[in-house]
Image (tube, rainbow, N blue to C red):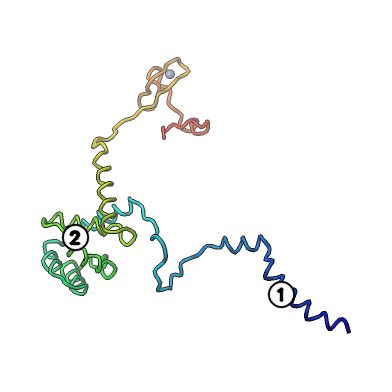
Amino acid sequence: MPKRKSGPQKRKKMVDTHFAKTPKNERRARASVPIVHDPFSRKKPRGRPPTISASTVIGRADNCRYQLKQAWKQLEGPLLAAQSEDEVKAALESRASAYASSYVPHQVADILALIHDKQFPKDSEARVNFLADSLGGRPNLTFRSSRDVCARERAKQRAKSPYQILRHEYYVECSCGYEGPARDGACRKCGAEINLFQNMVWGTDAWGT
Ligand SMILES: [Zn+2]
């Protein structure tokens, strides 16, 4: 019977073609599926850790500076004497109990490394700043990069003018013929008020942003 003979052969052929010819769009679809890090995996994710913004780093560092400063008088001695993570943890929990949860357990190892860092400063205030600025970008940044980001951000903040604008006026062209700076949001000549709503509707940015 010819049907029986060709049967298995045909089936084999079908399997082969299936492996050889995955439709192009299907292959593309498979390739475009992102590789997502499994949050339950114990393996360290490959590549660079996710990026962190400079404002986050400086925000955390400032917060940390504030907290450490509050507790530093009592904390400094026992913390700097710590030789193990357990001792760092104990120092934070006993001498900075209000803030300990910000550092225990996730930053204990970092703090231990920092207080034994060759660059760890001698001056009390510098010590607080060194710890805070090094920790601000963790774990995304190295201690060094975290301090660099903080230094750059602080330089930027210092470069800003210490003065603030107390008053600003628009430049107006009024139908009365006046052209020049407004006064209290109105034409200086006739007193016609700047219509913010009209400016919005017509697409003129009345706020100068
Ligand atoms: Zn006018």
Residue in the foreground of this view, choosing between 197 and 41: 41
Q: Looking at the rendering, which quadrant does residue 186 occupy? A: top left
Image quarter hosting the C terminus: top left
Which residue is at the far right? 1
Which numbered marker is on residue 7?
A: none
**Number of other residues with Cα within 10 Å of mark 1, as a class: few under 14, some 14 to 19, many 20 or more:** few
39, above or below 196, in the image: below
Which residue is at the far top? 177
Q: How far from the left and from the top, in percent, is residue 78?
A: 12, 69
Q: Residue at x 42, y 16 (%)?
A: 178
Q: Is residue 98 visible?
A: no
Q: What amino acid type should be assigned to the residue bearing mark 1?
A: Val
Rounded to the nearest whole Å, what is the CA distance between mark 1 and mark 2? Answer: 68 Å
Q: Mark 2 points at which residue?
A: 68
Q: Do the residues labelled 1 and 2 touch (CB within 8 Å)?
A: no
125, above or below 100, in the image: above
Q: Which residue is drawn at 38% across and 56% down?
A: 51
Total label count? 2
Q: Residue at x 40, y 74 (%)?
A: 42
Q: How far from the left and from the top, in percent, is residue 103?
A: 25, 66
Image quarter hosting the N terminus: bottom right
Q: Which residue is drawn at 33% across and 50% down?
A: 55
Q: Looking at the rendering, which quadrant does residue 207 occupy? A: top left
Q: Mark 1 points at which residue?
A: 15
159 sits to left or right of 198: left
